[in-house]
């Protein structure tokens, strides 16, 4: 019997033995092609020697030095590299251990910033429905997945939500994609006015929605309009790239594609690529300066912030992504994957949409392809596809279970950037069989 408290208490999980490139091998020797990076984490696959060497070498020097006492060479080097590559005026990096911590820190930094500059009434945070920002209580309150929120209502923090930019479900008859994007972006302005123009601290959004909708990018112009509204009302823009960042969509940061820079950026997952737990919050020099010239203390922290071994992993991952050109592989590989998915599922009676950017792709499974009616949530089709795929030796990330009755079941694909052409076929072949088995 296992004494590990698993996520799904009734699940019988295989035992991971070791990694081999894009594969995880279990204790029986069965190989699983990791087509989702666990949850968009493993961008380098599971046996990257450069990253393990960097971690090992850091562990040989020193594993941990509390940041209340020391900074460390790997943290300084990683921060410098990130800032050189980051969009806009992002100028400081706060290292944490994962995505929820990065989001939690960003919400608190936004609130504290306004206290420091003498606008303590700016307390509201606006987020979007159908988003995922993490499982800690602040990040959960920002998240817009009603199913995840339901058991914890009333949430500790009250946050306002607007609609996501989801053209597949939201566009009206005769409306252009651009006009649709502007219309939903303008909900932010309405919400700011409703809450009080000088009472909103920040708006938080994922540039490409991941864990709730399965790789939904915004339409062109949407984030530019969001940025304009934030600037007009003095609201900070927080972009959560925990899942879609670090090259996953073809540019190092997903917002590079939208031509928009945030005031605060959250990253994690691909930053450590699974070799170490690490996340980061980047902020502009203006925000940092306000804290430095004000109280001089960011009222937040965790024991493992700036962990040297984790930062060493992040530095080595960045070298692989940028210097070894792995990010450059993402757009062509992603397009090749999309072409194969279209060929296989484009006319499938139960596939409503195939979407995404780079190596971040989603399939929406629906009862009726024409009307896009989702399956009854009780069907748990996404979970059945996941299990059937595991039986085939394929990892894909299932999503479903929202309470608004509108969204169907989604399958997220986020394979490693080291993928080879033959493995693209292996993904589509195995996924095709898994979907057929799950629907049977
Ligand atoms: N934000 C986004 C966009 C995410 O996808 C996730 C994780 N799926 C998180 C935050 C939370 O990250 P973590 O699970 O590392 O706490």
Image (tube, helix red, strand yellow):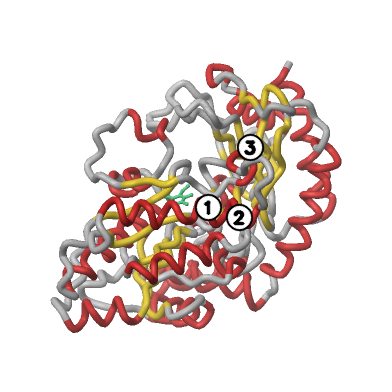
Quadrant of the image for the C terminus?
top right
Tell me if label 3 and label 2 are in contact, CB under 8 Å.
Answer: no
Number of residues whose C-alpha sits closer than 10 Å to that of mark 3, classed few (under 14), some (14–19) or many (20 or more): many
> Compared with residue 10, is residue 298 higher up or lower down, i.e. above or below?
below
Tell me if label 2 and label 1 are in contact, CB under 8 Å.
Answer: yes
Q: Nearer the viewer, residue 85 or 67?
A: 85
Residue at the spot of label 2: 179
> Compared with residue 248, is residue 228 higher up or lower down, i.e. above or below?
below
Of callouts 3 and 2, the N-terminal one = 2
Q: Residue at x 45, y 58 (%)?
A: 240
Asked which secondary structure carries label 3, the reply is strand
Of callouts 3 and 1, the N-terminal one = 1
Residue at the spot of label 3: 411
Count of numbered marks: 3
- Please give left or right for residue 214 compared with residue 197 in the image: right
Residue at the spot of label 1: 183
The circle drawn on residue 313 is none
Q: Residue at x 79, y 40 (%)?
A: 428
Q: Nearer the viewer, residue 15 or 439?
A: 439
Quadrant of the image for the N terminus?
top left
Q: Quadrant of residue 367?
A: top right
């Amino acid at each position: 019997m296992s004494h590990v408290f698993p996520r799904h208490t009734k699940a019988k999980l295989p035992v991971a033995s070791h990694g081999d490139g894009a594969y995880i091998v279990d204790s029986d020797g069965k190989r699983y092609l990791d087509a989702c990076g666990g949850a968009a984490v493993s961008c380098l696959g599971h046996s990257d020697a450069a990253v393990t060497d960097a971690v090992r070498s850091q562990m040989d020097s020193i594993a941990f030095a509390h940041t209340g006492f020391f900074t460390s060479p790997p943290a300084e080097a990683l921060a410098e590299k990130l800032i050189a590559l980051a969009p806009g005026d992002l100028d400081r990096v706060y290292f944490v251990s994962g995505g929820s911590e990065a989001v939690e820190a960003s919400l608190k930094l936004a609130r504290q910033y306004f206290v420091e500059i003498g606008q303590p009434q700016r307390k509201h945070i606006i987020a979007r429905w159908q988003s995922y920002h993490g499982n800690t209580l602040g990040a959960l309150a920002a998240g817009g997945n009603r199913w995840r929120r339901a058991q914890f209502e009333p949430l500790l923090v009250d946050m306002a939500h607007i609609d996501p930019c989801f053209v597949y479900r939201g566009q009206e008859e005769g409306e252009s994609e651009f006009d649709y994007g502007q219309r939903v972006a303008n909900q932010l302005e309405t919400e700011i006015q409703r809450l009080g123009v000088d009472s909103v601290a920040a708006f938080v959004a994922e540039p490409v929605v991941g864990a709730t909708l399965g790789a939904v990018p915004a339409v062109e112009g949407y984030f530019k309009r969001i940025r304009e509204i934030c600037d007009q009302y003095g609201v900070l823009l927080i972009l959560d790239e925990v899942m879609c960042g670090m090259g996953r969509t073809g540019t190092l940061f997903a917002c590079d594609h939208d031509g928009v820079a945030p005031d605060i950026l959250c990253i994690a997952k691909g930053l450590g690529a699974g070799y170490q737990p690490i996340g980061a919050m980047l902020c502009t020099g203006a925000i940092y300066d306000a804290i430095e010239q004000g109280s001089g203390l960011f009222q937040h922290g965790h024991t493992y912030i700036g962990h040297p071994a984790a930062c060493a992993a992040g530095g080595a991952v960045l070298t692989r992504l940028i210097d070894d050109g792995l990010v450059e592989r993402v757009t062509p590989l992603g397009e090749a994957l999309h072409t194969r998915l279209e060929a296989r599922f484009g006319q499938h009676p139960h596939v409503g949409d195939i979407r995404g950017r780079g190596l971040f792709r989603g399939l929406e499974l629906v009862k009726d392809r024409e009307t896009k009616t989702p399956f009854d949530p009780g069907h748990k089709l996404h979970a059945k596809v996941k299990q059937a795929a595991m039986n085939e030796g394929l990892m894909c990330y299932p999503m479903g279970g929202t309470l608004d009755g509108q969204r169907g079941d989604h399958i997220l694909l986020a394979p490693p950037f080291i993928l080879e052409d033959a493995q693209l076929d292996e993904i589509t072949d195995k996924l095709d069989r898994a979907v057929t088995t799950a629907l049977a």
